[in-house]
Image (cartoon, coloured by chain):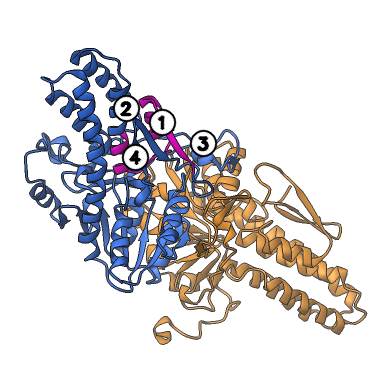
Chain colours: A blue, B orange
Amino acid sequence: MKTVEWHDGTVKMIDQSRLPSEVVVLELHDYKEVADAIRTLKVRGAPAIGVTAAFALALAAVQSRAKSREELLSGLHEAAEFTKATRPTAVNLFWAIRRMMDKAESLEPLPAPAIVEALVEEAVKMAQEDEETNRSMGEFGASLISDGDTILTHCNAGALATVDFGTALGVIRAASEQGKRLKVFVDETRPVLQGARLTAWELQQLGLDPILITDNMAGHFMSRGMINLAIVGADRIAANGDVANKIGTYTVAVLAKENKIPFYVAAPFSTVDLSIATGEEIPIEERNPEEVTCIAGQRIAPEGVRVANPAFDVTPSGYVTAIITERGVVWPPFRDGLRQISGTCDYPTPTRTNEERQ
Amino acid sequence: MKTVEWHDGTVKMIDQSRLPSEVVVLELHDYKEVADAIRTLKVRGAPAIGVTAAFALALAAVQSRAKSREELLSGLHEAAEFTKATRPTAVNLFWAIRRMMDKAESLEPLPAPAIVEALVEEAVKMAQEDEETNRSMGEFGASLISDGDTILTHCNAGALATVDFGTALGVIRAASEQGKRLKVFVDETRPVLQGARLTAWELQQLGLDPILITDNMAGHFMSRGMINLAIVGADRIAANGDVANKIGTYTVAVLAKENKIPFYVAAPFSTVDLSIATGEEIPIEERNPEEVTCIAGQRIAPEGVRVANPAFDVTPSGYVTAIITERGVVWPPFRDGLRQISGTCDYPTPTRTNEERQ
């Protein structure tokens, strides 16, 4: 099945918090349960979060007993605010909610039931687009991968981070499907271990034979010439190409630069946020300290210890070799490249430059 | 109590594999048990391993029923080989064993019982010296720490890595005792979590209030200007200043350089191995994959996944700001500085330079 899908008026998703020991499929009937699944990382990964948020709004519409358009829209606004409050960093969440709300508002002449139907259609369409996007990104990205490459990836930017196929892992998958022989190192990705639990598992399913390492080993293997390329996903990309992604991504990027190996970011264009000039404006989610002090229910640190637990970091664009999107590969200078592929006027211009902010 | 001590013909040590949830003191009567404690990380940290190995040989001497000097020495050689085979990277292990064997051989005119007595005395003396060494290192190192510094440390180079007081943590402790107000970030240090389990606990005992982070967060805090100094211990330092230390140390050093903050190494002179020209010659211990795939008995990765688990990495000397020893602070160029403080002819000259090896 897909990571998340619409099925007969319910949202079905793989509970990723239980992987890889159990494959449990949740069937949710209430948009608040869907939002809660986002908050508690039952579903995670920027593109998957986006589609799941769209499904949450579709579900809110289906659940609504609103008789009038106004009543429906007011309920949807409430659901949108509730869903937005789950996770602050990935822009896809806000992008998807805005797209759903824009859709609802654009249908103003129609009666409530027709709007509900159109919103379900829109969410299902977004899920389909996500898959197409990833396959296209995979094609573009695969051209950057050579036969015999040894690739490092961090966190999970695979099928499980999207509706299907994946972003960074989609690129690896597409290259592998082209017959390129690849070796993949997987950072376990503390604290939530998405690499160990999800990426290693996905690569096994794909018939690749990943090598799992702890996050602090990647530098060692790079310094010994045993990794020649790094590729990760993204949660938000600023107009200048700064990339917010899972905590530890910045470190991978610095190590890659120091060891002169390319560092690629693969993300759908919906991850690019042209409304912000630089990564400094991206809010970084601080999560529960217990993610650090407990693993699989076991306490690993002394009682009473202070903890910092930022879920993401920002990699300045200077460390990024190229950004792979479904619209093509963008090379530095990213400000120009990202604007170029944005094409239409979908996105607002940044109002402040980094220089003006300082 | 001390991390490891000689007590009435037995070796007592804190079982560090049980910390911080339980403080269990082992009392060992057989040198093979002591060697096993080294192998299974019940005692770890280069200086502590050295003293423990000396105690293992003292215990082998006490256990021996040898009637003649020759018989005793042959038994000691066997015990030395057994103990050497536990862990390959920390040079202190080999240094301590050599010192004990040199002592035994230098006493050749004496009868077996006198040699046994002298070996126990020598091991106890080495334990005392370790403490003095660390206090002296603390004094020298504290001069590099300023009031208000925020320090990052990796793994455990504390009292538990030595007989008492610690190396890198000894420097922090000495600076704190001088009244300098410090903030300390502690890398949890996967896979064995010495930072989370031991360093965080030790700093709590010292009344400092450490902030525990996962290894992949240090770069984030450095990039935000929230860490202004890094200090770690060492397991072996080559003649050119290359440093082998816990896996992840190289990454800390690269991040420190990139963010223009000093990276200090604190280690007793017994950690310096002038017999090897560069870090490339240091053997890196590969440990059990289960250290990566299981935490506190819980499996966190899919069955059948391949794992790499190097216990150490090598930080090229170019990343090291200074090496703090009990004989003073050594600045680059380290080849000269380390030879200078070696003073006597205790150590052989490197036989090959790095250039000759290539």
- Which region shows up in magenta? A24-53
Q: From the image, tell me which residue sits under label 2.
A: A59
In this rendered view, identify the residue nearer to me: B126 or B183.
Answer: B183
Q: Kindly identify which numbered label has been placed on residue B198.
A: none
Residue on which the image places disc 1:
A28
Q: Closer to the camera: disc 3 or disc 4? A: 4
Q: Chain of mark 2?
A: A
Q: Are marks 1 and 2 in contact (CB under 8 Å)?
A: yes
Q: Earlier in the sequence, mark 3 or mark 1?
A: 1
Disc 4 designates what residue? Answer: A5
Q: Residue beneath label 3, please? A: A290
Q: Position of residue A151 (x, y in %)?
A: 35, 64
Residue B302 position (above or below residue A229): above
Q: Earlier in the sequence, mark 3 or mark 4?
A: 4
Of callouts 3 and 2, which one flags the residue occurring earlier in the amino acid sequence?
2
**Label 1 and label 2 in one chain:** yes
The CA distance from mark 3 to mark 4 is: 30 Å
Q: CA distance from mark 3 to mark 1?
A: 26 Å
Residue B80 appears left or right of A306: right
Q: Nearer the viewer, residue B43 or A137?
A: A137
Label 4 lies in what chain? A
Q: What's the residue type where badge 1 is placed?
A: Leu
On what subunit does the disc labeled 3 rest? A
Is residue B336 found left or right of A235 in the rendered image? right
Residue B125 against residue A166 in the figure, above or below: below
Instruction: Give the Cα distance between marks 3 and 2.
Output: 32 Å
Q: Secondary structure at mark 4?
A: strand
Q: Quadrant of residue A52?
A: top left
Badges 2 and 4, same chain: yes
| CA–CA distance in space, label 2 to label 4 | 12 Å
